[in-house]
Image (cartoon, helix red, strand yellow):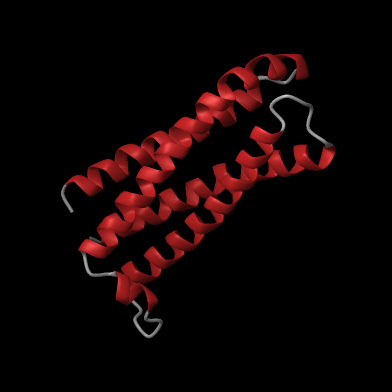
Amino acid sequence: MGWAIHLHLIAAIAWIGGAFFMFMLGISLRKKEDQDAVYPRIGPIYGYFETGALVLILISGITMIVNNGLIDVLFDMNVHNEVIDSLRTKLMIVAVIIVMTVVHMVISFKTMDRPKTPMERFLSKTSSMGIFILNLFVLHYAMVIRNIL
């Protein structure tokens, strides 16, 4: 595992920590004027930072799966044990997070110079909240796997 686990953990801390920060920022900035003053400034920086963290998570995660010979086992649905089933669940949640992240980022970058439509606002907030909540589930499954190993 070597470098991959360290890179994976650092990137995951950055990803989840950033999501937690933005969640707390969203709760604390109740006024629309405050949000309009803050989000356009930190949103793009956060987006690039989080994209980099997600890419590192994916690269290091795939590296660990391949290096540990788990790629074939993951796709063999006849193989079941606590680690493999937890890893499958974790990866399915990660896939949903990736889709939500793409939706959120497309809307965010598309609407940097104009107000969001009600549908864009709904999708942006829903995807953001979904990412935050699903990150907690990913963290749970990561801990389950680590406890088993």
Q: How many numbered circles does the render carry?
A: 0
Q: Quadrant of residue 27?
A: top right
Q: Residue at x 41, y 37 (%)?
A: 52
Q: Position of residue 21 (x, y in %)?
A: 51, 27
Q: Relative to the observer, which residue lies in front, 54 or 33?
A: 54
Residue sticking out furthest to the bottom: 78
Q: Residue at x 51, y 35 (%)?
A: 19
Depicted 86 relative to depicted 116: above or below: below
Q: Position of residue 127 (x, y in %)?
A: 65, 45
For the N terminus, the quadrant is: bottom left
Q: Residue at x 59, y 23 (%)?
A: 25
In the picture, measured across the screen, residue 94 lies left or right of residue 69, that is: right
For the C terminus, the quadrant is: bottom left
Q: Position of residue 68 (x, y in %)?
A: 21, 65
Depicted 146 relative to depicted 120: above or below: below
Q: Relative to the observer, which residue lies in front, 41 or 110?
A: 110
Q: Relative to the observer, which residue lies in front, 103 or 22?
A: 103
In the picture, measured across the screen, residue 122 lies left or right of residue 58, that is: right
In the picture, measured across the screen, residue 120 lies left or right of residue 57, that is: right
Q: Relative to the observer, which residue lies in front, 142 or 44?
A: 44
Residue sticking out furthest to the left: 2
Residue sticking out furthest to the right: 118
Q: Residue at x 59, y 17 (%)?
A: 41
In the picture, measured across the screen, residue 83 lies left or right of residue 133, that is: left
Q: Quadrant of residue 82?
A: bottom left
